[in-house]
Image: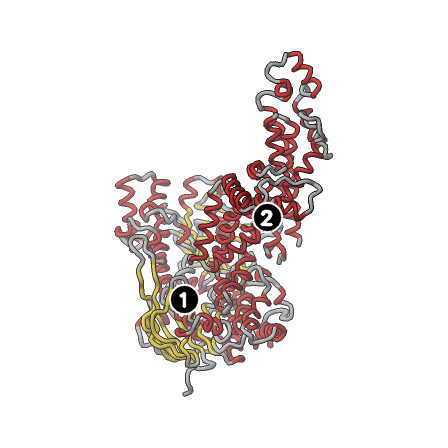
Amino acid sequence: MGIALKLVAQRIALSLLLLFLVSGLIFAGTQILPGDVAQSILGQSATPEALANLRRDLGLNEPALQRYISWLGNAMQGDFGTALTNGQDIISSLSGRLKNTLFLAFWAALISVPLAIFLGLVAVRYRERWPDKLISAVTLTSISIPEFLIGYVLMYFVGVKLGWAPTVSTVYADMSLGAKLQAIALPVTVLTLVVLAHMMRMTRAAILNVMQSAYVETAELKGLSMFRIIWRHAFPNAIAPVVNVVMLNLAYLVVGVVVVEVVFVYPGMGQYLVDHVSKRDVPVVQACGLVFAAVYIGLNIAADVISILSNPRLRHPK
Amino acid sequence: MSAPLLHVKDLQIGATIYPTDGPPKQIEIVKSVSFTLQKGKVLGLIGESGAGKSTIGLSAMAYGRGGVEITGGQVLLDGQDLLQKSPRGLRSVRGAQVTYVAQSAAASFNPARKIMDQVTEAAILQGKFTPAEARARAVRLFEKLGLPDPQNIGNRYPHQVSGGQLQRCMTALALCPEPDLVIFDEPTTALDVTTQIDVLVAIKAAIADTGVAALYITHDLAVVAQVSDDIMVLRMGEMVEYGPTDQIINNPQQDYTRALVSVRSIAHDEKPPSDDPILRMENITARYKGTQFDVLHDVSVDIAPGQTLAVVGESGSGKSTLARVLTGLLPARGGQITFDGETLSPDLAGRSRENLRELQMIYQMADVAMNPRQTVETIIGRPLEFYFGLRGRAKRDRVVELLDQIEMGSGFLDRYPAELSGGQKQRVCIARALAAKPKLIICDEVTSALDPLVADGILKLLLDLQARENVAYMFITHDLATVRAIADSIAVMYQGRLIRYGGKTQVLSPPFDDYTDLLLSSVPEMRLGWLEDVIANRRMESAGN
């Protein structure tokens, strides 16, 4: 176990370093944007004196490095400050939003990941025959259509015409799980369609690659059934590439759902971020950026760790 | 005579190939081959690569690799034609009645699963044994095959056992379901000679014990002579000769068989040692980056101008590392290299272009040593441009001259590596090395990937070129027959140390040290009963000690 543990520890240390660098980038990025919060609060017609007063009150006159250090220090203790625009505590509104986003992502992942892997296995089993071609055609079509279009089309047919699911996915903290699930049925469907193709095709390609190897021939010459060969002999060796793509897509489900959240008026992180970008509410944007980065890095590290642990050479050294 | 276990009648096998220019086409790769195999007997299939021997072997399981298809004939196993069976019917034969031992056990074991699971899988799924019975049988087979710790070796993963052990595990895998027929496809080719002999003994004993019939496929006639009752010689998909082992070895009827039996016809007399070596490596010590132990310990060798030093040893003996140190790819930790009278920088970066030119290299895998998108002219022309600044007409003339030297000629100028045979590819690599007009060429296992007759041609060419150009060779090989054919002096390496070093006659004459004795006595000889003799000798020696 020694080597594997060491590698895992290395990855985690690296990810922390990476997160630190990203925090610097996020901070620097929000500094070089033209205009500042004071300007956007007071509007174009503000007098220079009013601007200067507000800047002083907001602490914008301190040197950038000092502001960065105090921001990062507070962030590490879970304090992102208050939103400039409405004076609310960022962490409390953010955590509710993040919970909603994770809720949506969780259900989308719960459906799409097993479905994608299953479809990938089926595609390998019937490669170059009609099930393979049908799966490829459908998933590629769904990934090629912009998600907002799929969203509106589903909303119109499934929501308005058939009335099977609500068209607006607003959820509240005190809704029952069943009601919540019904509310998010459509966005989950859209997200599943969007991420399915990528994972399915990677599963197919990774397993097909393994199917060329000599040990698969050995399995064939043992008279095993095709599905057993794929599932027991090929798949365990294709986990690393598949996990990487799955994690990238999971990250997308958290970080990239802005459009879907806006279309379905879902109270998640994406919508929160978009609202505050348009108001130039820098502390909120920074907090969202940091959370997104943490999720992204975290999932990729998880992929790395799983890849490492799925390698028997590292798990069981000589 | 009872009905044979396996009766192959008039077998024809075709394949679809996809040439770069033009439409796909059908080619015939096995033409009308017939043979029979009785229960408990061993038939050796022998031939060079492309002879169709593996393809014929796999046809006994009605299996075609890639685009290979059985197009005609009958494969009767116990009187039933496998070619008429449904896919489901075939699956119940494969892994139960007929099993397969592949050349590379390392590639044929699934790296993600334990050895025991893989050894017993077919026996359990085919309903031959319950899991507990299968495991007990596997342990007995591990024991019979001489594997260490037979109770627990099955709990390991394939990468946790050595190559020779894994090959024996593969034999256990094939024997576990109590098959009627086992196909051994070059089971010892990838092993060192000293390991090969152990695996051969284990396989032979297992065949005798279980009474299973076997098809034994190999390119090495000396090996097949030890294990088989009959031999079929194949060439380009056709049968050349088929008869009892004794007759094929001692009284071959066909010219081709005679050539196979008498291969290694080269006689090379040792040249006298010289006081003024072109290369002197003194007290070389080396280790790989990030490791804590030396892979070379205090190695000192000389090479005289125009002579050949053969560096012999098994995998892991440090012979290729010695070459890496010489090329500067792995700077030595200690010791000194003197080349052509001047001290060489240990590191590649510290060497002059002239140093680089005078020291060239030829590799084992000619395939991957050439850029597949360059023509032969570009490949051989590159060093001419780089070292001598030749361009245009002059360069082309020199390339043609070199092609003539390697007995290929100007017709090959515009060919791509993919359009050359294995032997031709290696010749182009030789021409590329020669183009630099080197004083020393490192030849790293240059004939190991080639068929015996082709390898013979390459060795002759190398000796001719040496006589003409007075170039010295450091010839790295594990093949002692090759060493006998071309060396002037020999260095035997074992675990990073120089065990024995001197002129060819001296090194190959007794008294031997233990390791050299083991190495020399492990090289299969082309005679019946050799294996038994060696084993008997070794028993006597160990009893005497």
Q: Residues within 10 Å of mark 1 (few under 14, many from 20)?
A: some
Q: Which mark is residue A109?
A: 2
Badge 1: chain ID: B
Q: How many marks?
A: 2
Query: Taking A1 as reference, is B217 left or right?
Result: left
**Residue, x 49% and y 69% (percent of image)?**
A223
Picture quadrant where residue B47 is located: bottom left
The residue tagged with tag 1: helix, strand or loop?
loop
Is residue B332 visible in the rendered image? The answer is no
- Residue A81 percent across, percent down from the top left: 71, 29
Q: Amino acid at mark 2?
A: Ala
Q: Position of residue B381 (x, y in %)?
A: 33, 44
Front residue (pair A123, B24):
A123
Task: Report whether B333 appears left or right of B40.
Answer: right
Q: Residue at x 62, y 53 (%)?
A: A309
Q: Which residue is mark 1?
A: B64
Residue B82 position by quadrant: bottom left
Identify whether A261 is placed above or below B28: above
Q: Is residue B33 left or right of residue A76?
A: left
Colour scheme: secondary structure
- The extreme right residue here reads A77
| Residue sitting at x 60%, y 63% | B114
Q: Are marks 1 and 2 in contact (CB under 8 Å)?
A: no
**Chain letter of disc 2 in the image:** A
Q: Please state which of the two labelled residues, at mark 1 or mark 2, is closer to the viewer.
A: 2
